[in-house]
Image: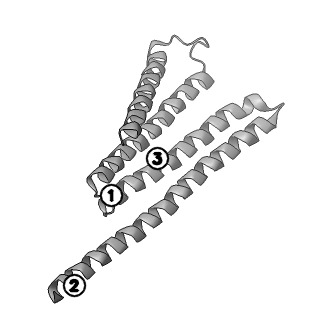
Amino acid sequence: MRALRAVLVVVLTGAVLVQALMVWALVSGSDPAGGSLPLTALRVVTILGIGTAQVALACVWRLVTMVRRGTVFSHAAFRYVDVIIGAIVAAALVWFAVTALNAPGQRDDPGVTLIMGGIGVAILGVALIVLVLRMLLAQAVARDVEAAQMQAELDEVI
């Protein structure tokens, strides 16, 4: 648990620093392209993309806390898993925006745009994997509730 939390802290700190630098570049207007629309749009999209990662990291932190406390097999965990799924879908949408912003510059080589679109589909695939894991969590929670009910009935008999 400590190693995972250390990784989460490092990644979240790095994400916040990069996001702050991107915001500073937008606000100060000190970008090399002089604030041209594609670079500005890419920076805004990058800030939003980093935000989706930060939301997912915060939810993973909460789930790790629940694991440590032994409360992860509860209905409260679904909220965090649902937010993670939403953050991954949002990240995929942000990636598709990056792909669309990059596409005009790739007219001579449309393969790059296709590859980027494929990466976006792969990101959506990760959301589907987390959705399957959510279903497994739902089964585990149901089994835990069922086991608690059986234990209560057994305690009454004894």
Where disc 1 sits, the SS reads: loop
* Image point (41%, 36%), residue name: 8
Say few, some or many: other residues with alpha carbon within 10 Å of mark 2 (under 14 / 14 to 19 / 20 or more).
few
| Mark 1, residue position | 72
- Work out which quarter of the rendered image holds the C terminus and state it: bottom left
Distance between the alpha carbons at the discs numbered 2 and 1: 25 Å
Q: Amino acid at mark 3?
A: Ala
* Image point (52%, 49%), residue name: 89
| Mark 2, residue position | 154
Measured from the top left, where is residue 16 in percent x and y?
Answer: 41, 27
Say few, some or many: other residues with alpha carbon within 10 Å of mark 3 (under 14 / 14 to 19 / 20 or more).
many
Measured from the top left, where is residue 140 in percent x and y?
Answer: 39, 68
Q: Nearer the viewer, mark 2 or mark 1?
A: 2
Where disc 2 sits, the SS reads: helix
Measured from the top left, where is residue 148 in percent x and y?
Answer: 26, 75
Q: Amino acid at mark 2?
A: Leu
Distance between the alpha carbons at the discs numbered 1 and 3: 20 Å
Q: Is 60 rendered above or below residue 131?
A: above
Where disc 3 sits, the SS reads: helix
Measured from the top left, where is residue 123 in percent x and y?
Answer: 59, 47
Q: Is 75 rendered above or below residue 30?
A: below
| Mark 3, residue position | 87
Q: Nearer the viewer, mark 3 or mark 2?
A: 2
Q: Nearer the viewer, residue 68 or 94?
A: 68
Give the residue furthest to the right: 108
Q: Of the two numbered discs 2 and 1 on the same chain, state the one appearing first in sequence.
A: 1
Identify the disc placed on residue 4.
none
Say few, some or many: other residues with alpha carbon within 10 Å of mark 1 (under 14 / 14 to 19 / 20 or more).
some
Q: Is 31 rendered above or below residue 16?
A: above
